[in-house]
């Protein structure tokens, strides 16, 4: 009976952590989706986010607690700064109209930067998980599945809302990204 409870406890813990880590991807996906994005790009971003949500905890596990504690705050600050820049640029682009060049979220580098910024937390969680006896593959695959699914849901919802907001969609998405950047830094 105790073994069954332990298995359920581990499964519930993994699911709660996966959802918590996926909320960054959902929220940021919502902001980018408001800029207007096609289904093909949504799926591509979702797959890359899922891969990063698998790779980052693995990297955290292998890097060890000491290195993770040193890089954890720096990585979070870097992710926050990146989101501030992306959000600020989206706000600026929407206010300037056609006069400003907007960031192309379809480019490979933009997708990688977006995926990295939403999966930084997974690195720290991976460092922490290295101290416990866990089912490694179940954990990282669950993180990847939820990260990918939640980014796709955020992008789809943002895309749907952007049609209603028309010209203000990009500015509102930029405000969301900028806000999350501030929250990462604080």
Image (cartoon, rainbow, N blue to C red):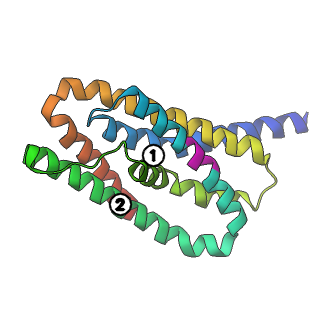
Q: Residue at x 41, y 66 (%)?
A: 78
Label 2: few (<14), some (14–19) or many (≥20) C-alpha neighbours in 10 Å: some
Give the answer, above or below, for where 36 lies relative to 98. Answer: above
Give the answer, above or below, for where 135 lies relative to 145. Answer: below
For residue 102: magenta?
Answer: no
Q: Residue at x 38, y 47 (%)?
A: 107
Closer to viewer: mark 1 or mark 2: 2
Q: Does 104 sit left or right of 3 as displayed?
A: left
Q: Residue at x 15, y 52 (%)?
A: 92
State the extent of the magenta-drawn residues as a range. Answer: 50-54
The answer to whether residue 146 is visible is yes
Q: Residue at x 86, y 34 (%)?
A: 4
Residue 182 or 137: which is nearer the viewer? Answer: 137
- Residue 171 appears in which quarter of the rendering? top left
Q: Position of residue 119 (x, y in %)?
A: 52, 52
What is the tally of numbered marks visible in this picture?
2
- Kindly identify which residue carries mark 1: 24
- Kindly identify which residue carries mark 2: 82
Q: Main secondary structure of the magenta part?
A: helix
């Amino acid at each position: 009976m105790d073994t069954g409870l332990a298995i359920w406890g581990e499964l519930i813990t993994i699911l709660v952590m996966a959802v918590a880590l996926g909320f960054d991807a959902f929220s940021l996906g919502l902001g980018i989706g408001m800029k207007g994005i096609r289904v093909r790009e949504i799926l591509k971003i979702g797959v890359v986010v899922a891969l990063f949500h698998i790779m980052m905890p693995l990297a955290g596990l292998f890097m060890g607690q000491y290195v993770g504690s040193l890089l954890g705050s720096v990585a979070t600050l870097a992710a926050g700064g990146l989101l501030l820049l992306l959000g600020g640029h989206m706000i600026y682009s929407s206010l300037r109209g056609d006069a400003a060049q907007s960031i192309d979220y379809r480019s490979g580098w933009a997708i990688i930067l977006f995926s990295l910024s939403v999966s930084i937390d997974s690195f720290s969680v991976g460092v922490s998980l290295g101290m416990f006896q866990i089912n490694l593959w179940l954990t990282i695959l669950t993180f990847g599945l939820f990260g990918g699914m939640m980014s796709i849901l955020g992008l789809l919802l943002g895309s749907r809302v952007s049609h209603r907001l028309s010209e203000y969609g990009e500015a509102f998405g930029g405000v969301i990204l900028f806000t999350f950047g501030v929250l990462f830094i604080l």
